[in-house]
Amino acid sequence: MSIAVGLVGATGYTGLEVARLLASHPTAKIVAATARADAGTSIASVHPSLAGVLDLTLQELDAESLAKRCDVVMCCLPHGASAETVHDLIKAGTRVIDFSADFRLSSRDLYESWYKVVHPWPDRIGKTAYGMPEFFAKEIADADLVANPGCYPTSAILPLAPLVQSGLIDTGDIIVDSKSGVSGAGRSAKIGTLYCETNESISAYSVGSHRHQPEIEDLVHRIAGTSVRVVFTPHLTPMDRGILSTIYVRPTSGDAKTSAEQVMRTWRERYAGCPFITPVDHLPATKHVAGTNRVQMTVRASGDRLVLVCAIDNLAKGASGAAIQNMNVMFSLDETTGLT
Amino acid sequence: MSIAVGLVGATGYTGLEVARLLASHPTAKIVAATARADAGTSIASVHPSLAGVLDLTLQELDAESLAKRCDVVMCCLPHGASAETVHDLIKAGTRVIDFSADFRLSSRDLYESWYKVVHPWPDRIGKTAYGMPEFFAKEIADADLVANPGCYPTSAILPLAPLVQSGLIDTGDIIVDSKSGVSGAGRSAKIGTLYCETNESISAYSVGSHRHQPEIEDLVHRIAGTSVRVVFTPHLTPMDRGILSTIYVRPTSGDAKTSAEQVMRTWRERYAGCPFITPVDHLPATKHVAGTNRVQMTVRASGDRLVLVCAIDNLAKGASGAAIQNMNVMFSLDETTGLT
Amino acid sequence: MSIAVGLVGATGYTGLEVARLLASHPTAKIVAATARADAGTSIASVHPSLAGVLDLTLQELDAESLAKRCDVVMCCLPHGASAETVHDLIKAGTRVIDFSADFRLSSRDLYESWYKVVHPWPDRIGKTAYGMPEFFAKEIADADLVANPGCYPTSAILPLAPLVQSGLIDTGDIIVDSKSGVSGAGRSAKIGTLYCETNESISAYSVGSHRHQPEIEDLVHRIAGTSVRVVFTPHLTPMDRGILSTIYVRPTSGDAKTSAEQVMRTWRERYAGCPFITPVDHLPATKHVAGTNRVQMTVRASGDRLVLVCAIDNLAKGASGAAIQNMNVMFSLDETTGLT
Amino acid sequence: MSIAVGLVGATGYTGLEVARLLASHPTAKIVAATARADAGTSIASVHPSLAGVLDLTLQELDAESLAKRCDVVMCCLPHGASAETVHDLIKAGTRVIDFSADFRLSSRDLYESWYKVVHPWPDRIGKTAYGMPEFFAKEIADADLVANPGCYPTSAILPLAPLVQSGLIDTGDIIVDSKSGVSGAGRSAKIGTLYCETNESISAYSVGSHRHQPEIEDLVHRIAGTSVRVVFTPHLTPMDRGILSTIYVRPTSGDAKTSAEQVMRTWRERYAGCPFITPVDHLPATKHVAGTNRVQMTVRASGDRLVLVCAIDNLAKGASGAAIQNMNVMFSLDETTGLT
């Protein structure tokens, strides 16, 4: 079997990471890549690391023709813009993995209140598989459309959801302090992400107002069946890749030390069949998972709190790696194909 | 007037920073520098950035002779080792600014339970000026010994203390999530702080067990007269310098937005006469204060919490800059001399 | 005495560095700063590191009114655009230090063939003081206009010129391989200098075609009276600041080892009265001079060649530090005022 | 077929890179790993990125037992120490890929004069396959011992050798200015490679005295049949990985522009069947090949010189990737197996 993959919005970092990862995938192959501004040029002229690796000319997006040639399309467009293209691609008969936030949330109201746009295809909100195979493998396998998770939510939902499910932590008092590499800010020409602005510096941004906060709350609720309230603070960290989320929760019973042991047991049981999730004894660093689809998580007691620490690569498990994992599930391949 | 400064433990990063900063001080001058391993070599051979700037040969430490030649000694030794040297220097008649934790805490028990050593000069514990002129200027002015504050505590005490003092925040629910540059780990040959171990990576360490937690609690108590409980998590961040502390607190009354405005007002009033403390509207980045003795802090509401964000340079206001500020106070100079 | 300084083009990195350095200058003070796009906003809102340090509102450029208020204007505009503004400022009666390349070269033809623009004020080409006080202090002292040197040329001319002057090296076979921090590329929104494009990467650019090559050749000729041919290759290096130039030359006589000793002697003699130039025995790193106006240089024999290594801070001695040094000379201050 | 791989000296960066790369190799598997200091602990406790990836306990080195269990041993010991172990492993009947310099050079005298040790197994000097399949594939295929190339030499020999072979460049005037990431300095606790010493800094080292200079000269001679003289300067660059070599040569005839075209043609012909070598039109950055076994090279005219620019990943094609490529050749696999 061979899977023909289309790549929409190929000039960003997630598009490049899809290309990098698929270069070693045994059965999937990028057959077409689109980019508005750079149509007509080779993908390697935009991403010189693909020279000698992927020989493709970037095209204008034409949903009909793309759908004809592709078994699945990875759509790396920004929110708002993405939903329309996704609609056209699905209607034209291909399957889509959407990297934007357009189909992640459970309700149109929640989406529109946070994203400040009118959703162009509201019918599919709340009826789209969330691309986290650790919890939604069945929906993903059958889906024509998969909403690929946000990077920060991945680093928070994976450690939190099983603990909420098992009633181990107080759902009203959760603080997620996340640190992301600069690639999370995308590949567009902005002063704020110039080397000399972000190097040798760490800063918080969008405090109290980042759109990944409702995504974390919504998905933990969807998975665990319980409402949660999250205070979420993202930070821009001077590194290319990686997210470290330091999560402060309160145990519902017993002392923090005993509860920490229960947390580790709960994770180990819940994620026993999940090849990418690794509960670890050490304190994970983002470097320990850089370039991989893996997730390392651990827990420590600190006073009367539990501190959960979770490390992912924002471009891999936080975006393009998860997309390939989802594709593997959609096409009945082993989840890890091309990702080890 | 000219101030003769001695530098003990000159080969580390705080020693280098003292030398760098004093190079532009109009009245203070390093007249002697000691270092165990490198005695007999020039300080510029250890720190090549001092070539053509400071022409001194490193010496073995001899408290008597050093005390004779110096108006004040900056002691950059590790805790435990420092207290004995400080004792000898004081007894020999000079004044000392101690960079270690040996004289910062209020009680011998607290010190010995966290530092796991028997204190060699317990009489001075609880009777030593804490080197934060914003709160202890009078004690510092008259002191023979000043305990220079810890880097993380500086970034937490300065935003927290006035809020505790004024009763604005819940003293039982304070989370300090701090991110430090690698220089905070010192200049000794360890695998853990090699470039390739820490670059492109962020990680938490000493979760629930870092010695700066009791220092924060103890000093906020000393300043505000109220006990506080702090959950503290330090992180190693891939940059040379800087600490960003993201602090989660609960307002004692009213909604978070109103409380955030009160926080800004409280800081502006409290720090009106403090030249280095700058409450700002923007979210501070460590780069905004790099290389300076300044502190930028701001506040945001996030759900029902307040998020305080404070940026300092760990080597400047977090160590050597504070020491020079203390020295200025001790010698009746303007606090900012040589630090602007 | 107090020097009123105007800053034109204040939003770039050289403008910020002028502000940073002048903050500790005892007699010079920025009284006005201009910026096209950000006029009307505070300088601290563009450069948050100036919060609490410099309280100025950015203005539209008006040469007449600026000239009236300023003893000297630092003009940080790009080449071509700069010459016209410089003309208007001079005509309006103030003195100018021009950061652009517009008045550095000796001939209009050379300028126009490399910069591909018609020079708006060709009369001053070849009649403007080159802002390197180590060689042109007298011209600078009397000048109404000083052409502040290019960053790469500074790192090449200082080691090369005395050796050409004394006939020690072959003038027809000089290779300058330079490595610069990213701030050299300026503070405008371009993909090429985003963090994720330049971090963890080094690359050559403008090989065989960089405009600093004729500047090096022209100025060494002007200083030493001898034509030289230079092959120059700049590299973009993942760091904020600094230039390291590794320069390959051939000794005109004797073996390389003996010649290397002569090189050191020549530098030591030539630069004996130059407070910022430090010939060193160690191999200099850019970090050894970061944030300072200092220059470290050394030499090694390698086969039949001499390898000269010179480190500067591109924003300090390579731009804004040199400008302040020039200003000091223009106003009869000690060269090092505010720069130690 | 399955290849059982032994890893000797597993705690360094090249050992970790072998483990990382072999994790996605379809037929080769690490069955044993040795490390003196950490014997008895799991490899994942030394390299936390291997948690959940490679489950092995580090052992003391026992050549006999290792040889019995392994089809091939990757020996990552330092020079001098390596030769003895290699000898024992070969005698015990396994095949070895040696990462040290002990068997790379053509003559014992050359080795001993540069490495200042008596070679413990001189019989094999000059009779060992140099592990660069682009030139020595046949020798490697049959070899019991392969000398894995040095990182800098790889980045210099690959662009230079075909040009010397075809007589395009002057063999007496070659300057190699190389910039390496810090991982090239190894993973031992030294102050010189601490984060705060190397970050935000570039410096030259071992100017005129680096041991990779004779390796470049010796191998170009072995490949091209012509003696060459090389001036070589390595630089420590603030990045984890990557080598960029900027090489200055003179064309033997014609002008530099015409010669540059011949260089590209020569490379394209010579490397047509070499899957990892990519002559490119753009100026390569180390980031373009990071994490891969690929080599990008290009050429520019600069005055009367040619400037060759070559980018590799020092840990991949410069060490562990090349070793796996060699292993593939030794075991009759496609050269690219596990390396795409």
Image (cartoon, coloured by chain):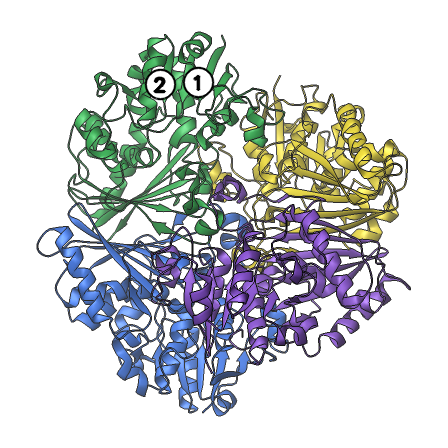
Chain colours: A yellow, B purple, C blue, D green
Q: What residue would you read off at disc 2?
A: D85
| Residue A310 x, y percent position in the rendering | 70, 38
The chain holding disc 1 is D
| Residue C294 x, y percent position in the rendering | 36, 67
Residue B168 drawn above or below residue D224: below
Mark 1 is surrounded, within 10 Å at the Cα level, by few (under 14), some (14 to 19) or many (20 or more) other residues, namely: some
Residue C208 drawn above or below residue D259: below
Name which quarter of the figure residue B202 lies in: top right
Mark 2 is surrounded, within 10 Å at the Cα level, by few (under 14), some (14 to 19) or many (20 or more) other residues, namely: many
Question: For the point 68% across and 79% down, which residue is it?
Answer: B273
Question: For the point 67% across and 58% down, which residue is it?
Answer: B153
Name which quarter of the figure residue A338 lies in: top right
In-image side of D110 versus B30 (left or right): left
Q: Secondary structure at mark 2?
A: helix
The numbered mark, 1 or 2, whose residue comes first in the sequence reads: 1
> Is residue A208 among the parts visible in the rendering?
no
Q: Are marks 1 and 2 on the same chain?
A: yes
Q: Quadrant of the N terminus of chain A?
A: top right
Q: How many marks?
A: 2
| Residue A104 x, y percent position in the rendering | 79, 40
Mark number, residue D61: 1
Residue C37 drawn above or below residue C178: below
| Residue C83 x, y percent position in the rendering | 39, 78
Question: For the point 60% across and 34% down, which residue is it?
Answer: A289
The chain holding disc 2 is D
Answer whether labels 1 and 2 touch (C-beta < 8 Å).
yes
Q: Quadrant of the C terminus of chain A?
A: top right
Nearest the viewer among A45 and B71 is: B71
